[in-house]
Image (spheres, rainbow, N blue to C red):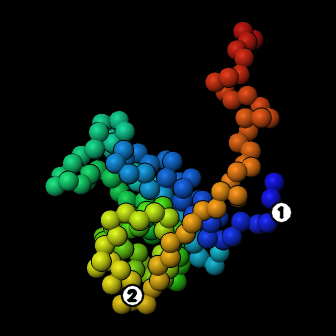
Amino acid sequence: MTLERIPWDQYFMAQSVLLSLRSTCTRLEVGATVVRDKRIIAGGYNGSVSGDVHCIDDGCYMVDGHCVRTIHAEMNAILQCAKFGIPTEGAEIYVTHFPCLQCTKMILQAGIKKIHYLKDYRNNEYAMALIKQVGATVDQVTLSKKYFAELQLGEEETASVEEAPQTDQ
């Protein structure tokens, strides 16, 4: 195990990567983490409205080349803040993919001042102009494998549920 602590930007981005594993839209798995004062205040991933069917179950609901069933990860995270009364003014957001134009507008309107992203994804020129115009910043994060290479996921200590021997007791 490394003695060097993971930098904040990689720590929060890793949270977003983990959240993306819950995505239910098969077109793109995205995770987002909203952070204020180095504390996670919300997280989200691509998925359907609570109570609706998911893309992984019924396929994507496509209109004009977009899946309209899916709420984007950034929106889910910011809506979580709204639902629970958590202010986003001056916060930062970590997203696995560069936000679409609509999500960029929502992020900026929510008062989030810094957007961190892991992967380029249809980076919109107008989104970049808006970010600059409102005085927000954007930063691409690179995850260093050295912080994740020695993760212990439990496979060495105990057998998984599927591998556990069955007994008749």
Quadrant of image for the N terminus = bottom right
- Asked if residue 5 lies left or right of residue 49, the reply is right
* Residue position marked by numbered label 2 in the rendering: 132
Q: The residue under label 2 is which amino acid type?
A: Lys
Quadrant in the picture for the C terminus: top right
Q: In the shown orientation, is residue 96 left or right of residue 51?
A: right
Is the residue 65 above or below the residue 24 in the image? Answer: below
Dividing the picture into quadrants, the one containing residue 105 is bottom left
Residue 37 at what x, y percent from top left?
63, 79
Give me the residue at 16% from left, 55% from top: 64
Classed neighbour count for the residue bearing mark 1: other residues with Cα under 10 Å, few (<14), some (14–19), many (≥20): few
The picture places residue 157, in percent across and down from the top left corner, at 80, 35
Side (left or right) of 164 relative to 111: right
- Tell me which amino acid carries mark 1: Leu
Q: Secondary structure at mark 2?
A: helix
Can residue 129 be seen at all in this image of the molecule?
yes
Q: Residue at label 1?
A: 3
- Mark 1 and mark 2: span between their CA atoms? 37 Å
- The image shows residue 58 at horizontal and vertical percentages of 30, 36
Q: Is residue 97 above or below residue 149?
A: below
Q: Taking the image as drawn, is residue 79 in sight?
A: no
Residue at 65% over, 57% down: 145
Labelled pair 1, 2 in contact (Cβ < 8 Å): no
Q: Secondary structure at mark 1?
A: loop
First in residue order: circle 1 vs circle 2: 1
Mark seen at residue 151: none
Given residues 156 and 75, the one toward you in this image is: 156
Please identify the residue farthest to the top as the structure is shown.
168
Number of numbered tags placed on the structure image: 2
